[in-house]
Amino acid sequence: MPLWVPVRSQVAPAACLSPSPEAPRALSLFSSSSVFPLPNSQCLVWRTDLLVISSFRMAEQPYMVASDSETTGDDKSQSAFHDLAIGIEVGTSKCSIAVWNGAQVELLRNTRKQKAMRSYVMFKDDTSTGEVPSGGASNKTAYEEKEILSGSAIFNMKRLIGRADTDPIVHASKNLPFVVQTLDIGVKPFIAALVNNVWRSTTPEEVLAIFLVELKTMAEVQLKRPIRNVVLTIPVSFNRFQQIRVERACTMAGLHVLRLMPEPTAVALLYAQQQQQQQQSLHGSMGSGCEKVALIFNMGAGYCDVATTATAGGVSQIKAMQGCTLGGEDILKNVLYHLLPNFDSLYSNRDMNKIRSMGLLRIAAQDAIHRLSTQSSVQINVDLGDGTKMQRVLHQSEFEEVNRNVFEICEKLIKLCLADSKLAAEDINDVILVGGCSRIPKIRSLVLGLCKKEKEYEGMDALEAAVTGAALEGAVASGITDPSGSLDMLTIQATPLSLGIRVHGGGFVPIIQRNTAIPARKSMIFTTTQDGQTEALIVVYEGEGKMVEENHLMGYFKVTAIPLAPKGTAEISVCMDIDAANTLRVFAGAMMLGTDRANSPFFEVRMPTLDDAHGWCAQALVKTHGSALDLTTIPKELQPQKVQ
Amino acid sequence: ASLGWSRKKRRAGDSPRWRTTPMRASRRESPYEVLGVSPSASAQDIKRAYRKLALKYHPDVNKEANAQEKFMRIKHAYNTLMNSESQFKYGNQSADFSRTAERSRSAPDEEFYGFGEFLR
């Protein structure tokens, strides 16, 4: 994996070099494991800023550890309470932190007493502290939504992170107040925030890292201990590239990712705990065998996830997962275009007035959508500031009509998930609805209807379930035990996407199928496509497409020392391994002819090995090597497991 | 005892076991033995045993180096039994493991290629 070179971001330089006498003090505070003195609130403001700086200076060190070594976190985690991992959910719109406090999970609040904090980072020139951006978790002044939409703040990081500029989601983000530029060549998009009337560039990872530093600082001050380990929730549909970007942002913020947990699986863990407690109070016995099957539907501002889980005795086994990039942002966009059909042409020119009026319209539309959850029609009155006023009524039926495509996709996801888990609606005991969009009446009725249920599962806060589950996983995976048994539980994860390799002709052959329980290890035998072929390219992809170009290229390497033989006779073994921390390793090598022994040492490659521009790599490989190094499958009945 | 390739072992310079025998399991062990249930156990019993062992050996809760290998073996035994169980449920009258297992092995569900011994 290529080493990451810390970006000389606008976060650090000016202030790092500043001769401020407080800087070294803050640094030593930060790096030592000593308990933070709880400062008075006035003091906190500058200290928070300095902590941001110091952690960025330190960003290099922790990253080297994460990148170079093979440690997955399991080796490092000890049962000591001070290492307890906290749970973080960074949502597209809101974010929250939770921690196991020794008896139960507790959500932390910021100084404005909020448990759900707005996810954004404000870039502003501040003469006293240099150029320190601040986010929604900050102890500083709360920014109003109007200011967040002024172009100076970056938000929706979760929709942008780990995507190339050819991605339709990135293109759809161009109507946000800050700048998203694409050149459509398969590299990182250019994003920029408005500072002093200049568009200043940044990256989604950097923005996420700044935000995480604030969350970390907030948690450290409240918990009076340094925070290092985290369990972070992610959408089901995040591919390994997106996961790596999130991990990288955490490392930049000085955090070590113990687990990245798909959001519905975090909810499943909380469900497992609730079921366990309920059964214990009913029967007074541990692990009684009554299995319950739940469908979890999670839809927030950015993503929609569906998962099914079978739970008994505190163990939740994920049966299947489906997810896609679909959420409140898409609903909002549909409503905006409905209210203002010429939205694009109106806002193609990005002057300050246009940005301001676009922001006002966004706020009004968002507010209308929220109110439509309880009203059948809403009045929209908004002065867009540029002489235009919008006054109209939006009916629920209209709202449902313009969002028909959204509801159709939700329906498809649920059906796919049920089919994957081989479950019928009748097999489901509970339907759990979480995430902000699960409050939309049409979505509730749709999910409940497909599951043939009258009522949804009660006893879970739709906005807190995922982060609570993440904090539980943090406690379990940190090795914390609870005498009352309330931590004797587990989620057995599954892989949301298939993993496999390219074969001759550009087909994708999955080796580990989606929804395989992890940890998992599988292998397959492939063979050569040329007479006397001594080398073969192993090109690894993740996804569900039948052809490789529909999937994500994870990396590639060459297997050498294939014994000389006619095509179709040499055997090349490819083994994939996913450990409990979800690290993927691929082992491959050639066998001696007619034996089950290796011809020479195998290769072991941790994936992904690629960074940006992976679409280019696949094209370049084909251009340079044609089909000379191609592999192909062997008939199923010749796969060794059949032979034994 | 050979426990396959745990990371520690490979670091210590042992030859990786998967290299030579990843897909050709050495010895067929009884999945009933691995899960500690009797061959007459019901699906309920099998599930319960699997969950109990998962709580003990899943690498999230068990920090020993070989927890992963142990858990994968448990998982494999469970999947094998549940596969033959569902075939039984759907009309296959043979509850005999050794015959149903041959069939389930060709199913693309949860295959596993064993390594040495454990849970003796």
Image (cartoon, rainbow, N blue to C red):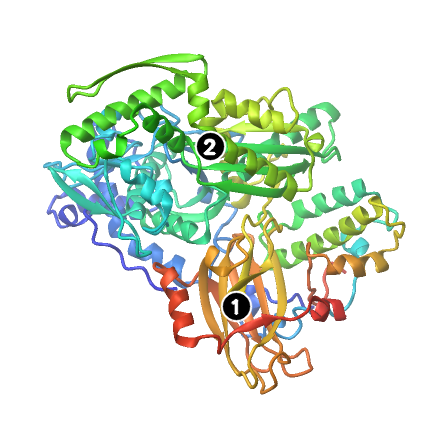
Q: Is residue A75 left or right of residue B85?
A: left
Q: How many neighbours does mark 1 have within 10 angstroms: few (below 14), some (14-19), or many (20 or more)? A: few
Reply above or below: A516 against B27: above
Q: Position of residue A7 (x, y in %)?
A: 24, 54
Q: Is residue A147 visible?
A: yes
Q: Is residue B107 above or below residue A598?
A: above
Measured as percent of width and height from the top left, residue A276 is found at: 66, 31
Residue at point 56%, 86% (across, down): A532
On the picture, is A97 further left or further right than A587?
Answer: left
Asked where in the image residue B117 lies, by quadrant, the reply is bottom right
Work out how far the residue at label 1 is from the one at label 2, CA to CA, in angstroms.
35 Å
Q: Residue at x 61, y 43 (%)?
A: A320
Which quadrant is the C terminus of chain A positioned in? Answer: bottom right
- Residue named by callout 2: A406
Q: How many marks?
A: 2
| Of residues B87 and A242, the one drawn nearer to the viewer in this rendering | B87
For the residues labelled 1 and 2, say whether their Cβ atoms are less than 8 Å apart. no
- Identify the secondary structure beneath mark 2: helix
Which secondary structure lies at badge 1? loop
Q: Disc 2 sits on a residue from what chain?
A: A
Of A454 and A484, the residue lying toward us: A454
**Residue A637 as seen in the image, left or right of residue A371:** right
Amino acid at the residue labelled 2: Val
Can marks 1 and 2 be said to lie on one chain?
Answer: yes
Instruction: From the image, tell me which residue sits under label 1.
Output: A505
Q: Is residue A100 visible?
A: no
Q: Is residue A298 above or below residue A22?
A: above
Please tell me which residue lies in front, A622 or B20.
A622
Mark on residue A110?
A: none
